Every structure is written in structure tokens, then in C-alpha cells.
Image (cartoon, rainbow, N blue to C red):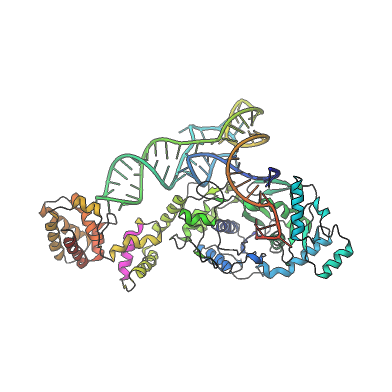
Amino acid sequence: MDRRVRVRFAPSPTGPLHIGGVRTALYNYLYAKKHGGDFLLRIEDTDQTRFVPGAEEYIIESLKWLGIEAVEGIGFGDGPHAPYRQSERKPMYREYVMQLIANGMAYYAFDTAEDLEGMRERLKASNVDAKYDAITRGTMKNSLTLSEDEVTKRLENGDAYVVRFKLPRKEEVKFHDEIRGWVSFNTSQMDDKVLFKSDGMPTYHLANVVDDYLMEITQVIRGEEWLPSAPLHVLLYRAFGWEDKMPKFAHLPLLLKPEGNGKLSKRDGDRLGFPVFPMNWVDPTTKELSSGYREAGYLPEAVINLLAFLGWNPGTSQEIFSLEELAEAFSLERVSKSGAKFDQNKAKWFNQQYVRKLSDEALAPYLQSGLNQNLPDNSVNPATILKVCGLVKEKISFTKEIWDYSSYFFIAPSTYDEQVVKKRWNEKIPALLDNLIENFQNIDSFIHTEIEQAYHQALEKQGILGKDFLQLFRVILTGVAGGPPLFEIAETIGKEETISRIKYALTKLA
RNA sequence: GGCCCGUUCGUCUAUCGGUUAGGACAAAAGAUUUUCAUUCUUUAAAGAGGGGUUCGACUCCCCUACGGGCUACCA
């Protein structure tokens, strides 16, 4: 039982990676790191009809953006068990199904879609559970009911067939889930699942078991939606005689939508105003855009942190964790059983924590991009950009907000906060502004301490209290009522600009 | 419908039989800050219901209710 820990994240490329999937990937990654094991990425593309171009690339890019790096697998360099795309592993699955058929654990089934529908309707009419199972299989067209000759003939003819798993009629299947404890199912409630489809591809159930075995996976950590099919997988390991190599199972609680209940789904995000995808995604056919955390101004570290806490906690009061710290602290034991609702406020708070930790240099590119979008021909001094970043940093929660909170550093206001103007402007103000202009002209080194001094001198001379004017002054310089320390703003925009803004206000408001 | 899983403040959660049921986000109030934002202090806020087991249950068992997942030749 001291096999090297190997876990995998195995999404299917049917669209953008959902944030719940990202969390599953994260927990797998953390588990591997914690135990000095391997985390691999396997692409489960056995359903060719659901293939979506770009989805695989999206998955890889998302994981890379977040720092959830695999050691083997698609997009991360092949390892000893290549290929890691199930469509490329197609030939080997047939071998394993044949083994099952030879052992009498599986059988050919030739039923058409109409046959199946007929069976289901018949059973439903008599109020019985409609499923292909130990009882109904005797009435269907399969290698259990047809003669050997007939089966051979059909196979040679190239008739369409699937291979179904022959479930024991009534058997309790118990397994230990690392999160939920002992879970048991009875095969009488299950059906003879298709293992091998008529297009020659395996179903998820077969592929997942075969690959996990071949890739020496030791822990299967996946979403709760897989819990009902886990007993089938257990039975498959037994049927193959791989029980001693069977991985442990851990079924993660679901991510729920913030209001009401139910699984968080694609539509929820843009409706509720927060992303459910790591990055923007444009549907290749409908061109519909689904927004992502990256473009919404979230930092990858924050997304990791907030996702980690949706369904897990360290048992201490520490909340801010780097990926490395998470890997150190993580354990399946501390994963909760019940679903977690996504909390937008908490997500915002997490991001804010990380934005504040950012250096001015790290924040600068975000401001620069806002600058490029709004002032295409700008050539703002890098030192100024850094200075603005430093001043505005604690005001914002998302990187993309930085432009909105700092545009006035680069664009003089043309309108003013009306409430402040209405409350604070009076006939004494123009004289004060003239006085300010005069005082500012005389400052040699235009730094905030000097500016403040000159400011107070003017106020004193005009007999106006600082309290009554400062916010108006802020509005005159920036147009808005809130922001970083005002005299530092003046310093940053410089003497000429400061004076010019005062003059403009004089013409506009007097 | 059937099967399975779940249920502690609005939200994420702590508690692994004995606690004034703790923390965080959000909310409210106050203080600081020229403003906004910070920061600090404080307040309000929870064991779904009913039975057991036990000297003692949020914690263990059963039932009910509610929520969720699954029920395809999808993953």
C-alpha cells in the first residue's frame, strides 16, 4: 500500500472548463503535491459527437494560468503512459473488452435504439424500472440470448453492436469513500452499462477504469456526480482482476449556485455578475461570450485561494494561502461533505487581499493596458505609472478597476461631482482659487508637503476652513469625491496640470 | 418515480459526546482618516423537525422533511 501517489484530472473537451472542474483539478493537484506524488492531465474525448474545438486548449491554458501544473499529460509534456488523449488510446480498449467477454463478464448486444425504446416503454407501462439488467437482458438481442452461430454471423456481417457489462443480479457493492466513508449500492438497482459503443469507442466507464489502472492512479478524486457510477467502476476492477490496484475514491461536494440551490451552471455566472469560468470563452458556433475570472480582473492566486476554501478548510484561522501553502495544508479529511454555494462577496474579498499584495511594478501593466485603451497614443512616464499604482492600489478589488479609479491622473476632469459642488461652492471660492494658483506658481519643488503648506497658507489668507474646502478642491482636481491623498495626486499630475485644472474649474464653475 | 449523498449564523465553515457553539465574508453601529477606501472596536446572526442511545448530544442510531446528484451507445 505504499505505491507512489498518482492522481489525475480527466476533463472532456466539450466546452470551457467550469470553475467546479477547476476546483477538482486543484484538489487533485494539491493532493499530489502534499504526498510528493504525480498529478496528470488526461483528456477524456471518447464522445466524438460532443467534441468542441478549442476546448482542450482552453483547459490547458486555464490550468497553466492558475499554476495547476501537471507532470504528465496533454499540454504538459508526455510521460511514460502516453498517449493521454483517450481517442488516441482507442485500440487498447478493445483488447480489454474482449477479455471481459471471454471471461463471461460482458456480452455483445445488438439492440437498436428502437428495441431499447420499446423495452423501456413496455416496462414503464407495467410500472417497473426500465433498465437493461439481469432480468430484461434475457428478452433482448444479445450474445446471451442469441445462438453462438447467430452472434458470429452478426459480427461477421458487421452488424452494429455494443458491449455491455454483465452485472450480478443482486449483490451489494460496498466501497470506502475518502470523504464520505462507507457507501453501498446494490446491483439490483443498477443496469448493464454499455462499456463499448457501436462506434468502436469505449464509454467513460470502461476508459476511465482501464486508463486509471494503466496509468497507475492511486486516488480518484472527482465530483459527487460520479458517486452513483462508482460501484460500477469497483465491479470493473474486480472483473479485470485488478482489485489490488484499485484506486481509492474521493467524491467532492458540488459547487452550488449562490441563490436557491442546484449545481452552479454556465448560465448562472453572467446572470449573477460573476464568472463561472477561469477565462473568457467564446462559443465557436453561437459566438456567445462567457466571461472568465482572468478577464474580470481576478488574480490567479486569489482564484486558487477562494476555490480551495469552497469545500475545504485548514482547521485554523488562516485564510490567505499560497498554492504552496495549500499543498502543505491540504488533506481529504478536511474536505466537507455538503455542497458549497459560491459567495461573490467572499470572492471579491479574496481578490482584494491579493491585489493589495501586488507590487507597484506588478500592477503597472494593468494600468498601462487601461491607458492604451483609453489614450491610444499615450507615452506616460513609467515612474508616473508606478506612482499612480501605489496610490490607487488599496482602493481597488480587481485589477481591471485600476483605470476607473485613476483615469483622472491622465485625463483632466470635464465634469464635477455635483453634490459636492452644490454643497461647497460659494462666492468666496474664486478668490481662494486665484490665491492657490499664485501660491502654487511659487513652489519650486512641487511635492505634496510643499503643496499642502501652500494650500493652507491660501486658506488662512482667505479665511476659509480646510474642512469646508478640501473636498471641493478634490473635485476640482479629479472630478470625483473620493480617492487617494489629494496632495499626492497634485504632486503626481504636476504643477502645470494642477494649475491648469484649477483655472478650468474657475471658468466652468464660477 | 427509483437509488445514492447531504443538512451548524444570510454565505464559507470550526466543533471529531461535556464549549458562554468559535472564526471569516456580508450586514449594522461607533472611532480614526480632509473624502472614498483602509484600519480598529462593537453588535446582530446558527445546530431542519421528531424519536431514541447516553449521566450528558450539533456530534452516534432511526424516522420524517427539505436540498442535491444520478437514473444515455454524455462525460
Residue A441: percent from left, percent from top = 14, 65
Name the residue: 68% across, 64% down: A215
Residue A416: give x, y in percent of width and height: 24, 58
User: Is residue A134 visible in the rendered structure shown here?
Assistant: no
Q: Quadrant of residue A75?
A: bottom right
Q: How many marks?
A: 0
Image: A410 above or below A340: below
Q: Residue A379: image x %, image y %?
A: 31, 73
In the rendered view, does A390 fall on the left or right side of A70? Answer: left
Q: Is residue A123 visible?
A: yes
Please state, as top left, top right, bottom left or bottom right, where the N terminus of chain A lies in the image. Answer: bottom right
Q: Nearer the viewer, residue A227 or A144?
A: A144
Front residue of this view, candidates A455 and A348: A348
* Residue at figure coordinates x 74%, y 45% from the top left: A127
Please state the extent of the stretch shown in magenta in the rendering.
Answer: A380-393
Q: Would you say A103 lies left or right of A510 here?
A: right
Is residue A318 rendered magenta in the image? no
Q: Is residue A44 above or below residue A133?
A: below
Left or right of A304: which side holds A356? Answer: left
Residue B66's place in the image compared with A120, above or below, is above
Q: Is residue A398 left or right of residue A201?
A: left
Of the 4 image quadrants, the one containing the C terminus of chain A is: bottom left
Q: Which sits in the foreground, A484 or A72?
A: A484
Q: Main secondary structure of the magenta part?
A: helix
Residue B45: percent from left, percent from top: 46, 36
